[in-house]
Amino acid sequence: MSGKLLRLACTAAVAAQAALAPVPAGAAPQPQRSVSQLLTDLQTLYRQTEQATETYDATADRLQRQKAEVTRLDGELARARIALQDSRADAGRLARQQYQSASGLGPYISLLLAPDPQQVLDESHVIEELARQRARTVDRLTGAERRKDAVARAARKALDTQQSLAGRQKKQRDAVQTKLHDVERLLAALSPDQLDAVTRLEQQGVDAAQKALTAAGSLPDDRPASPRGESAVRFAMKQLGKPYVWGAQGPSAYDCSGLTSQAWQHAGTPIPRTSQEQWRRLRRVPLRRLRPGDLVIYFPEATHVAIYVGDGKVVQAPRPGASVKISPLASNPVLGAVRPG
């Protein structure tokens, strides 16, 4: 299912407050799940979906770089083939010169019979230079052949890697779509009362987590943003209301790390594409020292990310069926924070 169809399906399910699906005749009735269990199930599905999405994004990013490498190597191989052709042409001229010299008296005998000894001495230098040129031609031909063979092997290997990544990406895309279908089915099975209760319980959990951070003194003390951090925040805030779509990097939709990476790209500081790479490669900072533009990473596997905007809040592309919005910093279990640049 495409991201657009999924959003329509999820929106319709929430807006229409779909009733529980009918139970097939003869089937045993399913036990009623508690509100907390429904919330746990939904959060688990959302988390699994985002894990699958981040894996897909990482492969898509690597595939994009691999395609660029294949293109680069194809260009290098074309140049290596031209250089080899030029070297072979030089070698052909060398062979013809040697044949022509062998058919006559030869340059050495001709010089020995010359009446002017100085002329012999001068032309001997010419012969030495010709010999050096011929040696360089042979070396250049040998090197060009080796270079062409090496680049051809690298190009074949790069293309094989690209094809392998493309196959892996397809499998990961299918895994994301399966998880999205699971979310869609669970949402469609919620009654209006269940949906309202799940929403209230989720908000209570977020409020409690935010209060706990405040009580522990872990919320930031609102340090001023750097110029690029401020630019990243401005970009992210302009995306408010745009839908979450897995794998999207704008301009009409985003997933979580698509939003953060594009915000910093527009601020002039490229950062890794996925939340896991952002957590692994960017400089970590304590929560209390956060400043607007820094990234807050969530869950033990670093599978979600948001941009800190100040006042204990973040802007994020939260999950399937939702839109880019401002949320409390503790809207998900916090792993830590990093600072681009």
Image (cartoon, rainbow, N blue to C red):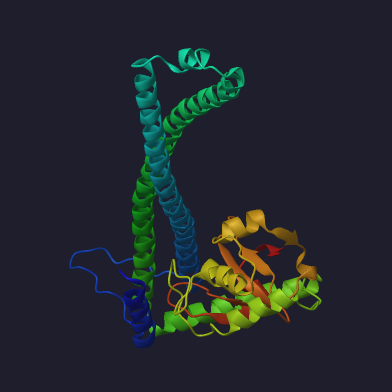
Report the quarter where the N terminus lies.
bottom left
Q: Residue at x 55, y 77 (%)?
A: 201
Left or right: 1 as drawn, with respect to 87: left
Q: Position of residue 166 (x, y in %)?
A: 36, 51
Res. 155 in view: no
Q: Quadrant of residue 103?
A: top left
> Farthest left residue?
25
Q: Is residue 195 above or below residue 135?
A: below
Q: Position of residue 128 (x, y in %)?
A: 56, 22
Q: Residue at x 62, y 59 (%)?
A: 278
Q: Residue at x 64, y 76 (%)?
A: 232
Q: Is residue 279 above or below residue 197?
A: above
Q: Is residue 302 above or below residue 268?
A: above
**Number of numbered tags placed on the structure image:** 0
Q: Residue at x 35, y 77 (%)?
A: 4
Q: Position of residue 239 (x, y in %)?
A: 53, 82
Left or right: 180 as drawn, with respect to 51: left
> Farthest front residue?
115
Report the quarter where the C terminus lies.
bottom right
Q: Nearer the viewer, residue 21 or 276?
A: 276
Left or right: 52 as drawn, with respect to 24: right
Res. 19 in view: yes
Q: Position of residue 284 (x, y in %)?
A: 73, 59
Q: Nearer the viewer, residue 252 or 207?
A: 252
Q: Quadrant of residue 25?
A: bottom left
Q: Nearer the viewer, residue 200 or 337?
A: 337
